[in-house]
Image (cartoon, helix red, strand yellow):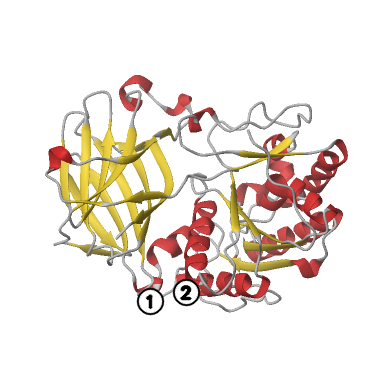
Amino acid sequence: MPALEPFKEGERVLILAPHPDDEAIACAGVIQQALKAGAQVKIVYLTNGDHNELAFIVYEKRLTLRQGEFVHMGQVRQQESIKAMKSLGLSEKDLVFLGYPDYGTFNIFSQYWQTKKPFRDRLTRISSVPYKDNPSYGADYCGESILNDLTRQILDYKPDKIFVSHPADVNVDHKSLYLFLQIALSDVDGQIVSPKVYPYLVHCVGWPKPRYYHPEMELYPPDKFIGSQIDWLRLNLGFEELDKKYQAILFYKSQTESSAFYLFSFARENELFGDYPVLELVSQEAKEKDVAYSGASRMINDLPEAELPDRQVLLEGDGQVSYAWENDYFVVRVDKSRKLSNRFGVLIYAFGYSKDTAFAAMPKIRIITAGKKFRVFNCRQRIVNSGVVLEFSRNYLVLKIPLKLLGGPDYILTALKAFHGNLPIDTVGFRKIKLNK
């Protein structure tokens, strides 16, 4: 793997963390090397991580579901991050905690825009930022609030490099932070010099292995991403940097008491960064049999092997997803090596962006199929006459989505999850697909 380019004096580095501790386990080396080079470092936390019930029970040695206790856990995790980052050379003024709902931000991104009823967290039963010392205190749990806050941070700081959670991460907050960043960067295009973006992966089933602390080992990409088109970069850590990373992770006692074996497995000889390339499509005025598909992505098994009752039947070997722009349709194609069962279905997200329309007003489309049947939703509203066309054949599924339904976008952020009945079996992380008009 090629090396991440060195940091330079005066550079502004922005690290976006979905939860307190993500910045340490994924970017502690980045923080140290950037500071040594004379760069500035700022960290923005999307949530305070107040939704981890298991960690709360283990850490507090008691079971409670009271609203104030979850806010308390968010405050605990915020203080842990402040101490951990101070150990790496940052000060509290370099850290910004937005305080949006842990485990709720993807729901907000996909469903809560232009609404009078914001998202309400099922555990905390809160619908606005509850942390009085956070700059977003009182902001409604809706897409506009998060996007405005993130955009403001980017415009004020003008970062040269941004490190953010990965679009193929299985954690929903990690996905949503990447998506919010893509929209924010598109909105500020032309107002600042475009920063370089480096996604980091944290949550992937069965990775990294072996668990626990192995400072003598390298961190490699998951085998599941072989053939995924991601160009990975590595940042090598010296012995002192690695030891400081390990010590920084120790500050997160609320998490290490229940998940030390997992968190410490990221303290290795290097850190990893990489993203899918932007896929560019051109319009094809072609009949269906002549359509050329692009950007084939290998589907990634989304469950541990032990949870699959019949691995061969469910995984079917070599699934892949590819895309095309046919006439006035955005086309998604799923290919499988074996015959598709009538219980096979997919969940597709398609979020369009247009420079001519505020993102809050753009459709947020998700499509759920089951065999030859499907349902289409825009945010939380079902669309009956959507114009979507589904073809379900022996070894493939083709879904044609009218570009008009997507708001006439310049590009589309799309992801897919495959199911056998109600059991998720495969997934493809979010891809950015540009339509060359």
Which is more toward the observer, 341 or 436?
436
- Please provide percent x and percent y for residue 310: 35, 21
The quadrant where residue 393 appears = top left
Helix, strand, or loop for circle 1? loop
Q: Residue at x 53, y 70 (%)?
A: 146
Between the residue at mark 1 and the residue at mark 2, the CA separation in whole angstroms equals: 8 Å
Mark sitting on residue 357: none
| Foreground of the two, 145 or 194 | 194
Residue 338: image location, x then y, percent: 25, 23
Q: Is residue 272 left or right of residue 30?
A: left
What crowding class fits label 2: few (fewer than 14 Cα within 10 Å), some (14-19), or many (20 or more)? some
Residue type (three-letter) at the residue carrying disc 1: Gln
Q: Give the residue furthest to the left.
A: 287
Q: Which residue is mark 1?
A: 114
Q: Quadrant of the N terminus?
A: top right
Q: Is residue 361 above or below residue 107?
A: below
| Labelled pair 1, 2 in contact (Cβ < 8 Å) | yes
Q: Which mark is residue 144?
A: 2
Kind of residue at disc 2: Glu
Q: Dot 1 surroundings within 10 Å: few (below 14), some, or many (20 or more)?
A: few
Judge left or right: residue 147 versus residue 17. Answer: left
Instruction: Look at 66% across and 72% down and name the residue there.
Output: 131
Give the image location of residue 42, x and y in percent: 72, 63
- Locate residue 92: give its quadrant: bottom right
Q: Which quadrant of the figure has residue 428?
A: top left
Residue at (34% x, 34% y) in the render = 320
Tell which of 253 and 432 is nearer to you: 432
Looking at the rendered structure, the number of numbered marks drawn on it comes to: 2
Secondary element under disc 2, as helix, strand or loop, is helix
